[in-house]
Amino acid sequence: MTRTPNSIAIVGVGKIARDQHLPAISANPDFTLAATASRNASVEGAEAFRDLETLLAARPDIGAVALCNPPQARFETACMAIEAGRHVLLEKPPGATLSEVHALMAMAEAKGVTLFATWHSRFAHCVPAARDWLAKKTIRRLEIIWKEDVRRWHPGQAWIWQAGGLGVFDPGINALSILSAIYPRPLHLSAADLQVPGNCDTPIAAQMRFHDRGGAAVSADFDFRQQGPQTWDIRVATDQGEMTLSMGGGVMHVDGAEVARGPDREYPAIYEAFADLIALGASDVDLAPMMHVADACTLGRRTLVEDFHDRA
Ligand code: NAP
């Protein structure tokens, strides 16, 4: 199908915009990067604005906006873009609270624009194969082990440690987005422990346990203090063997043997899905991963731990 490319703007030209959004947009014939709204950065070849309000007023031709700013700034920018009649792509997590995302959903519906809450890890190569493998098995145990060194992956990102920035749930929510995509039925949180540095608003580590009406023991262990090997694994024991999704969903093993591995196409696939949603006049907002994090914040037991400093 031949489609007219959507002129798109990026808000918040930072790490994820440069690492993933810019290459994915330039490789996608359905999109042309027309402008950016960023206080301190710009992209060669795109008109640069310091704020979204000015961009929207100056460029009515831009039909879509990708919000790559941190979650605390997401709602205000999303409202502006939707009110101006533009389609909106939200980086994960889609907002700082569940209720603000519900408000955006209602606004987008009333305006007749597409709202796409992206969960990039759901587009990891082996996620569909893992979902299919699990579909007809009796699950006995599922463990998420998501442990990374925050100083290596998020240097200088103060917003992660401020209220609304999620702390270790910023990467952890990626695992929860895979969990809610591959698990054959809904789960809900039954207990959580959060370790919060004395000088931060958000947790540096967290453990979660889930209630499964099928009786499986489902848990997650997130830690931002991991030195040495980094782990982004989901390990599942069933009545018909064991499956491990590793590298954030990029590799799948069954009973120790590799059965699938694929290239990283998470962001190209996100922009393909966004183009399809715009063409269909549809939206896609699934709040299940964020609901588990919100539940951990209401149900979780907090322990104060050693202060965190960006430079060790
Ligand atoms: P970042 O580089 O720290 O921030 C992106 C840009 O947003 C910044 O360069 C800044 O641009 C603007 N910004 C920063 N703090 C802001 C604030 N308080 N208010 C308004 N604008 C602010 O963060 P990132 O790593 O790209 O992450 C952004 C989002 O993408 C997060 O929700 C994150 O979870 C998600 N994400 C990140 C990664 C990753 O690997 N880093 C992977 C997947 C998804 P200006 O100063 O120029 O305005």
Image (cartoon, rainbow, N blue to C red):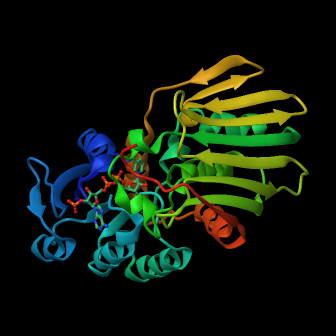
Q: 201 or 98: nearer the eye? A: 201
Q: Is residue 153 above or below residue 37?
A: above
Question: On the image, which quarter does residue 298 sit in?
Answer: bottom right
Question: What residue is shown at x 29% (from left), y 74% (from top)?
Answer: 81
Tell which residue pokes out farthest to the front in this image: 306
Q: Is residue 91 above or below residue 122?
A: below
Q: 91 or 311: nearer the eye? A: 311
Quarter of the rendered structure image containing ligand 1 = bottom left
In the shown orientation, is residue 231 left or right of residue 80? right
Q: Percent position (x, y) of residue 284? A: 51, 62
Q: Percent position (x, y) of residue 79? A: 35, 78
Q: 19 or 124: nearer the eye? A: 19
Q: Is residue 22 visible?
A: yes
The mark total stands at: 0
Which part of the image, by quadrant, shows the C terminus? top left
Q: Is residue 28 visible?
A: no
Q: 155 or 111: nearer the eye? A: 155
Question: On the image, which quarter does residue 26 sit in?
Answer: top left
Question: What residue is shown at x 46% (from left), y 70% (from top)?
Answer: 163
Q: Percent position (x, y) of residue 7? A: 21, 58
In the shown orientation, is residue 4 left or right of residue 95? left
Question: What residue is shown at x 50% (from left), y 54% (from top)?
Answer: 170
Q: Percent position (x, y) of residue 125? A: 54, 33
In the shown orientation, is residue 257 left or right of residue 32? right
Which part of the image, by quadrant, shows the N terminus? top left
